[in-house]
Amino acid sequence: MLGPESGTLAREHRPGGDTLVRIDNVYKSFGTLRVLNGVSLEIKRGQTTVIIGPSGTGKSVLLKLIVGLLKPDRGNVFYDEQCVNKMTPAQHVQVRKQIGFLFQMSALFDSMDVGQNVEFPLVEHTDMTDAERDERVDRVLRMVGLSGLQRKWPGSMSGGQQKRVALARAIVLEPSLVMYDEPTTGLDPIRADLINELIIALNTKFGITSIVVTHDMASAAKIADRMLLLYDGNIICDGDPETFLRSENPLVQRFIQGQADQIELESIQQGLGDKDTDG
Ligand SMILES: Nc1ncnc2c1ncn2[C@@H]1O[C@H](COP(=O)(O)OP(=O)(O)OP(=O)(O)O)[C@@H](O)[C@H]1O
Ligand SMILES: [Mg+2]
């Protein structure tokens, strides 16, 4: 899978197994702002599902609903047949352990070194010995290419390195599902591709199911078995990358090609015009 054809659309897509995550008619608002408007979606075990969509459309909210950090106003979210939004705190901890979450902001603890950051979920959720934890931390840091950097401080590392530390922390409990919220944002193309390769490797070598939110279309086309466009509270396009990228839906094409629409352009032009007359 990491051979010469990776990165082209020729890669074979994994068909996916049974349903790991089921989102059933979910509504979510914040005050008067309706974010999700009856979203239904099934994530298949073993697949990498990429979610794209405009800023503020509810992609991060969707991930937080899956892991139970937010609750739907209406509808249900199931992880492995268990309803996440109706769990007891103890049941929720069990599910939480099976889901790695790479947050949009890396969210590392600045007061802890890299080793302590990565070790944190092991301390919280396992009764591993010190030696077992050291061994596991060493292994995941090697997996993300940061071998031996346990005693570094996150604040002294580059953005790309911090993302990889956060990724190491997200996978340290050996989760079945990893959710990546904009994993390549802010990285140069080479560092971004390293993250793409890591996502592919975790999926193909360890069978980890992945959900990736991204604005990076090159990354999406490279890693996705399936792509979704979330727009205005609903999923408006869903398919394998080839079908998705060729969709004739103008919203999809506008998004893929990064084109602003006429109304957006006029509003900017008006704004610039106003500034001109002001100054
Ligand atoms: N806890 C919250 N309280 C109030 N509003 C929220 C909360 N979380 C998200 N929102 C609002 O919900 C909307 C969707 O937010 P979300 O973070 O999911 O967007 P997104 O699609 O991830 O955008 P981006 O691509 O910029 O990350 C936004 O308008 C946001 O301000
Ligand atoms: Mg977001």
Image: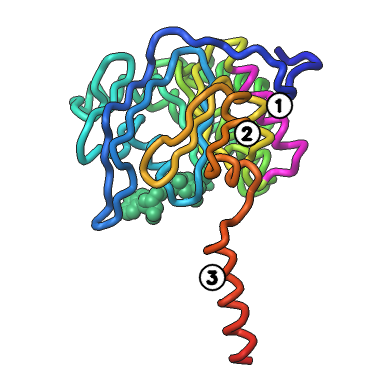
Does 29 sit above or below residue 133?
A: below
Q: Position of residue 171 (x, y in %)?
A: 52, 23
Q: Which mark is residue 164?
A: 2
Instruction: Specify which label sits upstream in the sequence, 3 or 2.
Output: 2
Mark 1 is on which residue type?
Answer: Gly
Q: Kindly indicate whether the residue at mark 2 contacts the one at mark 3 (C-beta within 8 angstroms).
A: no
Q: Judge left or right: residue 57 versus residue 169.
A: left
Q: Residue furthest front?
A: 248
Q: Secondary structure at mark 1?
A: loop
Q: CA distance from mark 1 to mark 3?
A: 45 Å
Mark 2 and mark 1 residues within 8 Å of each other at the beta carbon: yes
Residue occupying the point 63% across, 52% down: 259
User: Rounded to the nearest whole Å, what is the CA distance between mark 3 and mark 2?
Assistant: 39 Å
Residue that carries the numbered disc 1 in the rendered image: 145
Q: Residues within 10 Å of mark 1 (few under 14, many from 20)?
A: some
Q: Position of residue 227 (x, y in %)?
A: 53, 28
